[in-house]
Amino acid sequence: MSSKNNNNNKISPFLKWAGGKRWLVNSYPDLFPTKFNRYIEPFLGGGSVFFYLQPNKAILSDTNKELIFTYKAIKENWKKVLTYLRNHHKNHNEEYYYRIRKMIYEDLFSKAAQFIYLNRTCWNGLYRVNLNGTFNVPIGSKVKVLFDNDDFEKLSSTLRNIEFIIGDFELLINNATEGDFLFIDPPYTVKHNNNSFIKYNEKLFSWDDQKRLCKSLIYAKDRGVTILATNAYHNSIIDLYKNEFDLLELNRSSIIAAESKYRRNCSELIIRSTK
């Protein structure tokens, strides 16, 4: 049986991700189960919960193939990725950033290094693509590409026995069986969008997707799967889940705004299969 890693062998996520859950594992660690068969996460992103739990058996997925390629590259040969990253670190400036942003790499490890480099030096670590699927986030204020706490060897070791899948969330959720733990952190979209960031998410994850997600989680709960999900604290989301799940409101600080003075406290919805 896989379980939460309690050996204090802490690993920090190596990517910054909009909507990431570092705040959740740091402030509310007791929400997570300590024993389960497999850890399954269909919206991987920066992987904060995975790196916190460090499960022995896991299936990780995302529809973002460049993201999954990056995890696979670190798993397969972290030294190659680090070699390319050191070169980006040495050459980073504004002109270099935009030149690398336009590059199309074929090699898995140079693609991964490009992804990490752009993530660490773009505006606020935001991942956004245009209608053609091209990454188009401008350069940010960060100048460091490599950090003092980077440990790609340990990351690679943690990912050694992990299965990666590129695909729709329903594929993974339907694969979950009794005793598995599902952590669900989808893009936040609501029935009536009135926020520009949520409108961007709507292109990636529609309201119909939200309803499909809810239905698949109900089926998983009925199979005996342990579920912890996060979502927007909004009446439309609450109405979807209130009859089948335990709901909890948590407050956190929003960090999407570039300047701290524009950031504010906001609520997020926690959806649990059991109290």
Image (tube, rainbow, N blue to C red):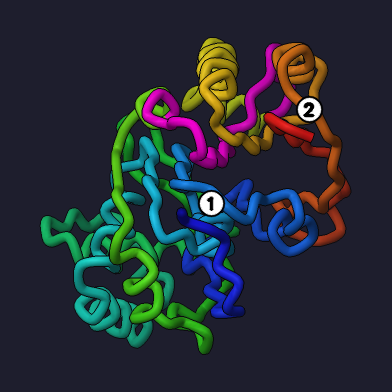
- Give the tally of numbered discs: 2
- The answer to whether 192 appears left or right of 60 in the picture is right
Mark 1, residue position: 126
- 3D distance between C-alphas at marks 1 and 2: 31 Å
Residue 82 falls in image quadrant: bottom left
- The answer to whether 151 appears left or right of 200 in the picture is left
| Helix, strand or loop for disc 1 | loop
Check residue 80 for magenta coloring: no
What is the number of the mark on residue 20? none
Q: Is residue 239 visible?
A: yes
What residue span does the magenta drawing correspond to? 173-195
Q: Which quarter of the image is occupied by the C terminus? A: top right
Residue 225 lies, with reference to residue 20, above or below; the image says above
What is the number of the mark on residue 246? 2
Front in this rendered view, residue 171 or 93 = 171
Q: Residue 85 at x, y = what percent?
A: 31, 78
Q: Amino acid at mark 2?
A: Asp
Mark 1 vs mark 2: give the one in front.
2
Q: Residue 77 at x, y = what percent?
A: 20, 73
